[in-house]
Amino acid sequence: MLLGTRLVAGDVTLRLTEVEAYWGGNDPGSHGYRGMTPRTEVMFGPPGHLYVYRSYGIHWCANVVVGSKGECAAVLLRAGEVVRGEETARERRGDVRARDLARGPGRLTRALGLTGEHDGSALVGSRAPIALVAPDEPVDPQRIRTGPRVGVSGPGGDGADYPWRFWLDGEPTVSAYRPGKPRVRRG
């Protein structure tokens, strides 16, 4: 379980409060749905690495690879609370409320200083430049909520077929929900 886990990148640490799961060829919302490409290769394992990509040419997003080697599965890091290094996060993010420093996947990567250079980075081991650290205490399961992913529509068009967004109830750092909109192909 990634919720409550701390992600350490340099002098900034955040506690994860929201994530979304993606399951490769079984999931039309996954970058790996159509198979492995040079861009998505890291998503096919081994687990414990970062898959970092540019979203809409605007900001970076980071996923933790969770599938076995050859299996495409990853968890998008959607939001977190900065618990150490707030000054550095503010230098990167500007004058925003503390709850907004890492509220949303693009804000999270910016607060941590993650870019495409971190794609494929190990998250475990003594030489890992970015580290996942287990929480001091496990998250109370009663606080975990689940629902459709943000901005992703499923086969039915509303994302309800993929309730793979998980968050900690009552956390102000959790991002606002926006339903996905089916794409309209232009001729």
Image (cartoon, rainbow, N blue to C red):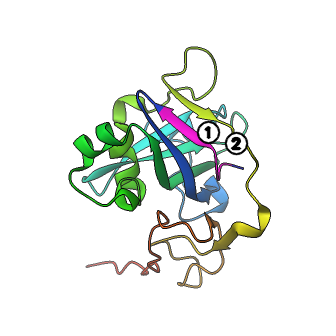
Residue 163 lies in quadrant: bottom right
Q: Earlier in the sequence, mark 1 or mark 2?
A: 1
Is residue 167 in the magenta section? no
Quadrant of the rendering where the C terminus is positioned:
bottom left
Residue toward you, 144 or 76: 144
- In the picture, the disc for residue 128 is none
Q: CA distance from mark 1 to mark 2?
A: 7 Å
Spot occupied by residue 70 in the image (x, y as percentages of width and height): 68, 37
Residue with the most extreme top position: 127
Residue type highlighted by circle 2: Gly
Spot occupied by residue 176 in the image (x, y as percentages of width and height): 44, 74
Identify the residue shown where x is 71% and y is 67%. 143
Q: Secondary structure at mark 1?
A: helix
Spot occupied by residue 78 in the image (x, y as percentages of width and height): 49, 57
Q: Secondary structure at mark 2?
A: loop
Read off the residue under disc 1.
44
Q: Is residue 154 left or right of residue 141?
A: left
Q: Are marks 1 and 2 in contact (CB under 8 Å)?
A: yes
Spot occupied by residue 71 in the image (x, y as percentages of width and height): 69, 42
Identify the residue shown where x is 66% and y is 31%. 46
Residue type highlighted by circle 1: Phe
Q: Which residues are magenta?
A: 2-8
Read off the residue under disc 2.
67
Identify whether 12 is placed above or below 74: above
